[in-house]
Image (spheres, rainbow, N blue to C red):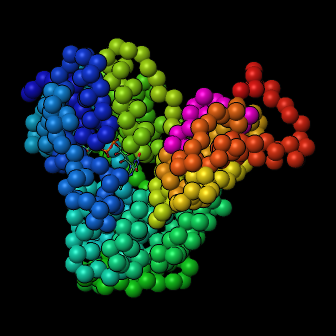
């Protein structure tokens, strides 16, 4: 049996960040990482590799990312963990003892429990194998593809297939595209863009049957009565309906878990001494209302892993919770979102005030000036910003990050309406207006127009 200081299970963003940060903090601990796949991957870039924008090998990360900082990388999967004796056993039967265990096993795409969902032409998208299989179908003469799930991953897939010349369908049981990111009215331009590119979109629709003929699915049945015929040899279907944490390994253990993953505290400690976890394998909560919230994003995994490394290196730090700043593209629209949409806030029992700001991406007389729309969501009880959505023809992430900062700093509508911004003809609208400021002012005007009394018992100052 070999003895190691720190064992990491998983070589995704959480495992990589944890090991690099710990090295930087000169914690003086030897690190061993288990990762079964030949390469870590940049999952976010998979659709663009499928589309053919660059060589697919570019989605693979170099092992030197971790080996250069002294990590011993073992290309095997961990088969079991004995928390009592502080041991892990790998798939070759080797047993390793640890001082500290860091679990970063991530999450895997779900497949709904429908007959036919495991047929040979049905995929999910995450691994190098998934990417290669989908590309082989496209290069093997696929004419049609169905994507189930109109979240960011599903939309990016359907547009990649469409760009490769396939006839495509996008199915979602929600009423509109990107329902976890934007409210229905903000998704209208996206529907138009999908339609303009020939994607057959069906919302409020579920896949109810997959008929299998020979090797693959040949007919997809929807709850709205429609059917989609596929060539079972060539065409394919891709599920992008959510992720489930990779925690099966711990099912019969004392590790505390919920359906959404391993329970950690704000310092990424589990309920078992010397066992930490971070990233997609964890359940955590929203920083806004401190209630459980899904947050399976690399932009959550990375800060969680940094906190764990700092805590292990003896520097106290705490994770405040998910804000879920995220972005995607629908053709030339850049869509960003942070915090809660109005619909999600209301479903969590928060009464909201919303406002909109509309400008153009550049001074309107400049060549290439395009629409820019911002929606702000605030909590009516204290006017605090709890969400924002941006639709733009230029990157939305910069504006979304400003709104996230406002949420993090607990700013109110009035506080964010005082944002001091910059302006230049090639880079923004006129100095007279910022879409973020305008959205806050609009929300305040909407509130004032209702004539309800201003009353903020829990606000010390009107920030
Ligand atoms: C197609 C796609 C696009 C995405 N786009 C974005 C985006 O644009 N922005 C964004 O923020 N996020 C995006 N994400 C989400 C993001 O990739 C994940 O949140 C992130 O990878 C989570 O990191 P992680 O380290 O927790 O888990 P993962 O990256 O899933 O890594 C888990 C690691 O654990 C290993 N592992 C699992 N079980 C074992 C075991 N028993 N033994 C050993 N190793 C094990 C796995 O093999 C893997 O190496 C996307 C995800 C996908 C699939």
Identify the image quadrant of residue 69: top left
Q: Is residue 442 left or right of residue 436?
A: right
| Part of the protein shown in magenta | 398-414
Q: Is residue 194 visible?
A: yes
Q: Main secondary structure of the magenta part?
A: helix
Q: Is residue 461 left or right of residue 6?
A: right
Identify the image quadrant of residue 113: bottom left
- Compared with 362, 70 (above or below) is above
Seen from the viewer's position, the closer of residues 291 and 62 is: 62
Residue 35 rendering spot, x and y as whole percentages: 20, 42
Residue 260 rendering spot, x and y as whole percentages: 45, 44
Magenta stretch holds residue 409: yes
Residue 449 rendering spot, x and y as whole percentages: 87, 47
* Residue extending furthest toward the top: 314
Seen from the viewer's position, the closer of residues 177 and 368 is: 368
> Which image quarter is the C terminus in?
top right
Q: Is residue 128 left or right of residue 411?
A: left
Image point 61% across, 52% down: which residue?
363
- Compared with 31, 215 (above or below) is below
Residue 378 rendering spot, x and y as whole percentages: 70, 41
Image point 66% across, 61% down: which residue?
185
Seen from the viewer's position, the closer of residues 279 and 47 is: 47
Q: Is residue 108 visible?
A: no
Magenta stretch holds residue 140: no
Identify the image quadrant of residue 186: bottom right
């Amino acid at each position: 049996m070999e003895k190691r200081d720190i064992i990491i299970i998983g070589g995704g963003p959480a495992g990589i960040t944890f090991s690099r940060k710990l090295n930087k903090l000169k914690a003086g601990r030897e690190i061993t990482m288990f990762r079964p796949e030949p390469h870590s991957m940049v999952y976010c870039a998979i659709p663009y590799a499928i589309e053919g924008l660059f060589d697919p090998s570019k989605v693979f990360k170099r092992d030197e990312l971790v080996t250069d900082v002294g990590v011993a990388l073992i290309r095997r999967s961990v088969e079991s963990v004995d928390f009592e004796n502080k041991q892990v056993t790998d798939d070759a039967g080797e047993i390793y003892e640890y001082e500290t265990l860091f679990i970063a096993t991530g999450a895997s795409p779900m497949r709904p429990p429908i007959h036919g969902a495991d047929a040979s032409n049905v995929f999910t998208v995450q691994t190098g194998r998934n990417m290669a299989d989908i590309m082989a179908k496209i290069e093997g003469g696929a004419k049609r593809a169905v994507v189930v799930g109109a979240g960011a991953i599903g939309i990016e897939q359907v547009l990649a297939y469409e760009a490769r010349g396939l006839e495509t369908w996008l199915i979602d049981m929600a009423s509109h595209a990107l329902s976890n990111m934007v409210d229905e009215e903000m998704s209208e331009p996206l529907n138009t863009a999908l339609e303009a590119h020939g994607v057959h979109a069906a919302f409020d629709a579920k896949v109810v049957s997959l008929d299998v003929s020979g090797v693959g699915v040949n007919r997809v049945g929807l709850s709205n009565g429609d059917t989609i015929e596929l060539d079972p040899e060539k065409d394919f279907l891709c599920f992008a309906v959510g992720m489930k944490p990779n925690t099966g390994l711990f099912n019969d253990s004392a590790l505390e878990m919920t359906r959404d993953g391993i329970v950690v505290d704000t310092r990424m400690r589990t309920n078992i001494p010397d066992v930490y976890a971070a990233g997609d394998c964890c359940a955590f909560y929203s920083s806004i209302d401190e209630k459980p919230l899904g947050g399976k994003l690399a932009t959550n995994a990375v800060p969680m892993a940094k906190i764990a490394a700092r805590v292990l290196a003896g520097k106290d730090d705490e994770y405040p919770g998910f804000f879920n700043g995220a972005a995607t593209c629908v053709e030339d629209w850049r869509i960003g979102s942070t915090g809660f949409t109005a619909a999600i806030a209301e479903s969590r029992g928060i009464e909201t005030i919303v406002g909109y700001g509309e400008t153009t991406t550049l001074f309107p007389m400049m060549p290439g000036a395009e629409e820019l729309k911002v929606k702000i969501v605030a909590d009516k009880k204290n006017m605090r910003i709890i969400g924002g959505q941006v639709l733009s023809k230029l990157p939305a992430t910069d504006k979304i990050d400003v709104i996230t900062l406002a949420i993090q700093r607990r700013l109110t509508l009035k506080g964010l309406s005082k944002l001091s911004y910059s302006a230049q003809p090639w880079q923004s609208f006129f100095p007279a207006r910022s879409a973020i400021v305008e959205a806050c002012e609009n929300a305040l005007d909407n509130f004032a127009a209702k004539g309800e009394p201003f009353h903020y018992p829990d606000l010390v100052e009107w920030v």
